Image (cartoon, rainbow, N blue to C red):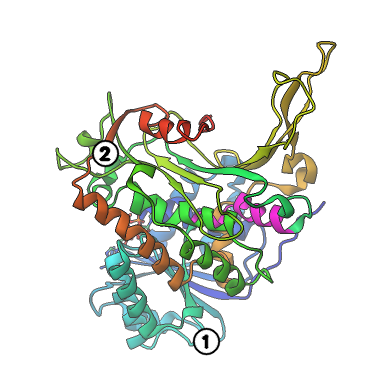
Amino acid sequence: MVSRVIPVEPFDLVIFGGTGDLARRKILPALFRRFSDGQMPEEARIIGAARTEQDAAAWAKWVEKALKEFLPKAELDKALIAAFLERLDYLAIDAMGDGGWKELKGKMRDGVTQAFYFSVGPSLFGALAERLHSFEIASSDARIVVEKPFGRDLASAKALNATLAEHFDETQIYRIDHYLGKETVQNLMAIRFGNVLFEPLWNAQYVDHVQITVAEEVGVGGRGAYYDKSGAMRDMVQNHLMQLLCLTAMEPPNKFEPNAVRDEKLKVIRALDPVAPADIVRGQYKGKHSYLDDVEDPASRTESYIAMKLHIANWRWNGTPFYLRTGKCMKARGSEIVVHFKDTPHSIFEADAGSRANVLSIRLQPDEGIDLRVTIKEPGPGGMRLVDVPLDMSFADALGSDVGHVPDAYERLIMDVIRGNQTLFMRGDEVEAAWAWTDPIIEGWIERAEKPVQYETGSSGPEEALMLLHRDGRRWRDIA
Ligand code: NAD
């Protein structure tokens, strides 16, 4: 099987924050990979724009270093790197001032797709949008890519949406959530809507419960000051986990088309019941590495872990809980969506014969993949003993070696921006609905002066989170 690479139209991509951490670790390596695969046409150009005063050659050197640091050696073909660096240009610009903007206008070409990536702090998003407009830089179908965080509550998200809307149409705004660009997340849609096998079972009648886990091994690191004002709810649940929940629970859209998909996701968020305090566990890591040592406030009540039980109040999901959890300093790094199907309605086997429940897990990281557990007879003469075994769905084996590397989410998403496809980006009303659901939960914690419980660094999270499932007769899947 040969993978198809369809070159995109010629483009000018301006990366505001082109000297930042995200540009270095994700955006530029992703662009290089798309270039190496032949997806960038001859005329494509990438313009770095940031506060640092330097020329294009100095930025290109910095980019080369970043590629060498963040890409595997085998991908670093000298001639390809040199050709890629040819596409780069740089401009010193101040988002808050007027310096550099006329020069940027002079650099933009007519007749090519324009994209402006806002890879800067959120306080600059509005200023950038405004100057792109007032200096008449952006063409009428230019795209802007907005990084997270998109607001810190409903009011700020609404204000940001309103500012962007003053200068850009919704069809031009690409709010990025890199979880949506992951191959397996897209495969979740392929599995659900491309097979007749799963969709008939994808409801409360057959699904016992769903677990969505995003576990990180690292702590807040150098981001302590930022993170302490945010916490796991704002940093992970409101955006990434909510998006995964939506894709898992949404109704089939009538087409794989941006607004059809986003309409269905929005309906899921709107159908979420308010969450009772007893259904939420907030935690803070402690031990050899403690959260309170990583932040400035020694009495901080910000959560580095959260587990919650959610109900989606609609016909499909009535009675099927969705358990979400995410945390830092956990025993391993791993993100997955796990769909636990119900037991067979009646067992013809002995009560102690073993398992009869199917589990479908969609793993996002570390190794993206899908695993379906089915019950079979244990081999051998020991009578009818049942065991769960994985049905092998390894993409690499099934598709052969031509499948190549699993593309990074940013590769897919940046090319979608150039192609003008918003399916995997969040619409303004979706983001607002997610905040409208999140705000009362956070306000409740503040009103009740709630303190997070503690959990050991390197563990699977607080005891209370285990109890959240135990009391329902269920257990979390082990974080590998
Ligand atoms: P960073 O601090 O490393 O880089 C910030 C960039 O913005 C620099 O290039 C700097 O020159 C530029 N900048 C700052 N003030 C400016 C101004 N007034 N005018 C023009 N340029 C200015 O930040 P980062 O980690 O690269 O993050 C960028 C954005 O991406 C943020 O919104 C962040 O929340 C988001 N994000 C980052 C990561 C990550 O892994 N770093 C992950 C997800 C989202």
Residue 87 in view here: no
Q: Is residue 288 left or right of residue 180?
A: left
Q: Position of residue 113 (x, y in %)?
A: 55, 79
Q: Residue at x 81, y 11 (%)?
A: 382
Q: Residue at x 32, y 64 (%)?
A: 151
Residue underneath mark 2: 452
The disc label shown at residue 354, or none: none
Q: Position of residue 300 (x, y in %)?
A: 18, 42
Callout 1: SS? loop
Q: Position of residue 25 (x, y in %)?
A: 44, 50
Range of magenta residues? 178-193
Relative to 331, say whether 164 is above or below. Answer: below
Queried whether the magenta region covers residue 185, the answer comes back as: yes
Q: Amino acid at mark 1?
A: Asp
Q: Is residue 256 left or right of residue 24?
A: right
Q: Nearer the viewer, mark 1 or mark 2?
A: 2
Q: CA distance from mark 1 to mark 2?
A: 54 Å
Magenta segment main secondary structure: helix
Farthest right residue in view: 381
Q: Relative to the observer, which residue lies in front, 74 or 128? A: 128
Q: Residue at x 30, y 48 (%)?
A: 231
